Image (cartoon, grey):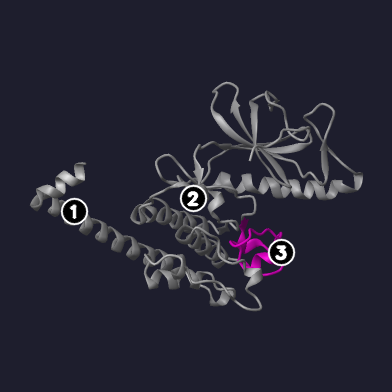
Amino acid sequence: MKLTVDDMCLGEGTIIKNTYKIKKVIHRSELSIVYIGHHIKSKEIQVIKEYFPKALALRDLDNKSMLCRLPSFKGKYYELLEIFFNEAVIIRELHHKNIVGYIDHFEENGTGYIVLKYDKDRTLDTYIREEKEISMSDLFKNIILPMIRTLQFIHKQEIIHRDIKPGNILIREDGSPLLLDFGSAIYYKNQSSNRIFTSAGFSPLEFYSEKAKQGRYSDIYSFAATLYYCFSGRAPLDVSERLIEDRIENIKQHNKKITSLLARMIMWGLSINSRERCPSLKLFKAVLYVEHLRLKIIEIWIEKREKKKRMVNPTFIEKDMQ
């Protein structure tokens, strides 16, 4: 869907911090506007996120500055600005090849900006939809296993992402994943209350409450839901629809190629009650490694069988070449 640029968005060519030039809008939400831009001197392409809570603010006549709609909105406006900058504070501390790279953040024009490294390619949900033939072995090796290692790295820093989903995982040109959007990430050990932020099908029950305890097991739910999507092409039934009667379909019903062990692990990760959920990414990783090894052995066996056919059956070669 093409985004319409209106008076809410910074115009093409707008310069901020005397350093970055806006090129175009790529995404808008209730809290921010995301642009593609570039560094004026280096010409390096970058992602620029501008804080713009549209329910609270509007653009001034200079087409750059931000104004609160009402004086009474100022308290909420600056409270959300602090939450907006939390993403930059967290990403700045996370130096990892599979995590979006931090460049800068600053206040200007009465609002805030976060500048991130730009990587061009498709999100995981688009990749799953568009790829005609996806090798299961490659899916494990290039995307799933690197993602679980990335999550383990984040959790070691006592951070939970809180929005793991296919739309927040970019698949780069070399096939490797890049985790995006830390806008709702938190240092989970320091939190007494949490802002409610949910993604249908991918958020655990505890994300629907400000007071519910959240931890690594919360990201495990979202990771399991992402695997569910990878192997079925659809998000699991949202947790809010599972409370009275849990009618979630087992992943095995949508994909017969995965083993019962992996299917049970995914469904365990999707447990509504966090106390009944898989508590460790180590367990998940062990099962995923076994699954990857099994798939690789099958691929090698098939390749050897095809090679043998070509060696003993000349007509097979002729048919194959036609």
In the rendered structure, which amino acid carries the disc numbered 1?
A: Glu
* Residue 36 falls in image quadrant: top right
Q: Is residue 217 above or below residue 124?
A: below
Please indicate whether residue 297 sits to the left or right of residue 234 in the image.
left
Q: Mark 1 points at which residue?
A: 306
Q: Name the residue under label 3.
A: 193
Task: Give residue 247's position: percent from left, percent from top.
Answer: 58, 75
Task: Give residue 18's position: percent from left, percent from top.
Answer: 68, 24
Is 206 colored magenta in this rendering? Answer: yes
Q: Which mark is residue 129?
A: 2
In the rendered structure, which amino acid carries the disc numbered 2?
A: Arg
Instruction: Tell me the SS state at disc 1.
Output: helix
Gap in Å between the C-alphas at discs 1 and 3?
Answer: 59 Å
Q: Which of marks 3 and 2 is nearer the N terminus?
A: 2
Instruction: Tell me the SS state at disc 3.
Output: loop
Q: Do the residues labelled 2 and 1 touch (CB within 8 Å)?
A: no
Magenta span covers which residues? 186-214
- Point out the image quarter for the C terminus: top left
- Point out the image quarter for the N terminus: top right
Q: How many labels does the image show?
A: 3
* Residue 62 falls in image quadrant: top right
157 or 284: nearer the eye? 284
For image coordinates 20% across by 42% down, the residue present is: 321
Q: Which residue lies furthest to the left in this view?
A: 312
Q: Residue 17 carries which label?
A: none
For image coordinates 77% across by 29% down, the residue present is: 64
